[in-house]
Image: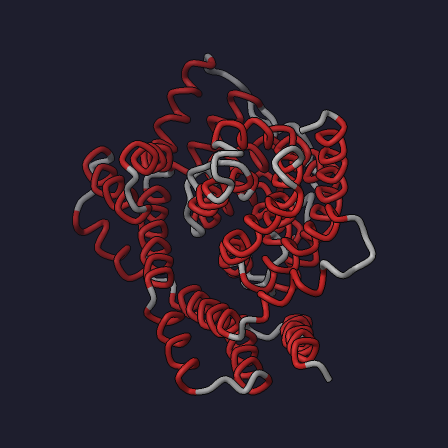
Amino acid sequence: MNPEILSLIKLAGTFAVIIGLLAMKRPLNLVMSIASVVVIVLYALPVDQILPALQAGLLGYNTINALLVLYCITFLQRMMEARKQLAGCQNAMNGLFNNRRINASVVPFLLGCLPAASTVLICGPIVRDAVGDSLSSDEAAATTSYFRHISEAFLPTYSGILIAISLTNGLVTPATFVLGMLPVVICLFISGYVIYLRRIPKETGMVIDEPKSYYWKLLVKSVWPIFLSLAIILVFNAPVWLAVIICIILEFFVNKFTFAEITPFFKTAFEGKLMLNTLAVMVFSNLLRTTGVVNLLPVYLSKLPIPSFLVWALIFAIGTMVGGSMTIYVLCIPMAMASVGTASFYALFILCMNMSYIIMQVNPTHICLTLCSEDYKIPLGSLIVKSVPMVVVATVLCFGYYFILTALGL
């Protein structure tokens, strides 16, 4: 058998193992550890490739950065919970809109502007309270993850988007990308509304006894650490962990914490299970990239007897599932640009970025999904299954938007 075909079959087998183990509700760190062994065995990786992949997965910059951000965000969350700021955020939104659907969607969307996986941990309590008994735990978890990530689809605060745009050599700018993605944001909200959001009762039952200005002030008082972190990142190009640490220090003084109050947070902010899951996912991702299988996808998918736009959509979707969005951006954006030319590249670029983003919402190697499933105490597989309907509707809408862009000659 052709060795390249065999490599793709091994890839399918690896993901079949992951799906099977998740369906059996095995712990994520165990699933990813077994999957890593499967990759090593199936691809017969030599030691000189295994060791660097393990080192990058356990001690690499991306791993250390993710763990540090997770710890800092969790620490800040503990402080905000201690001063009831998360409850204050919900009360403020109730006073402004008196709509539980807004609390379950717009609040995670806004908090998601902070480019940190562990932001989903702050969204969780707010969504749970807004949802109540109208959704099951796994449906509420899928709703939390889905709306928290909508901002990640179009904001250039995320490094992957900036890299993707830079690879277009000026054909797409941050401004034109954000403008072109605004209808996609609407599509994503529509998808979430159709599947789950409409099942949540609107009314909060809260009696509005204060002027709107009071609730706007309460909202600012409640969430200022998150948006100040975002401002520091945008204005000073600071690392996420540094921006959050600055806000932790300011939170200490602004809300008059004592050292005795925050001392327990140094221990409770260390979420051992979440960090172990993160390490397992990062090791698996690095081992899979080492196989080079992602480089084979464009070669074989391009031979399919389907329209070219669909070929590229599949390349970005499957490539993102296998190698991550950053890998597929670097590998395939220049190829896509060369294949279609500059005249019709914008519409294809928007479509491919959408497919990469959408597939990440059901990718078991997506760190945010692991954090969200642990926060809700549900299996990762359950969260993914409940996210699929929203992803399907969003995909259909995004293809419709692509056809509109091509009809306009963009």
Q: Name the one closer to the observer, 330 or 85.
A: 330
Where residue 136 appears, x then y in whole percent? 68, 52
Q: From the viewer's perspective, is residue 84 above or below residue 58?
A: above
Where residue 227 appears, x then y in whole percent? 37, 33
Q: How many labels does the image show?
A: 0
Residue 388 seen in the figure: yes
Quarter of the image where one finds residue 104 = top right
Q: Name the one closer to the observer, 201 or 54.
A: 54
Residue at image coords 27%, 35%: 236
Residue at image coords 67%, 35%: 344
Q: Name the one closer to the observer, 276 or 15.
A: 15
Q: From the viewer's perspective, is residue 92 above or below residue 136?
A: above
Q: From the viewer's perspective, is residue 314 above or below residue 294?
A: above
Q: Farthest residue in the right direction? A: 305
Residue at image coords 50%, 68%: 285
Residue 21 seen in the figure: no
Residue at image coords 63%, 53%: 316
Where residue 21 appears, x then y in whole percent? 64, 76
Left or right: 119 as drawn, with respect to 251? right
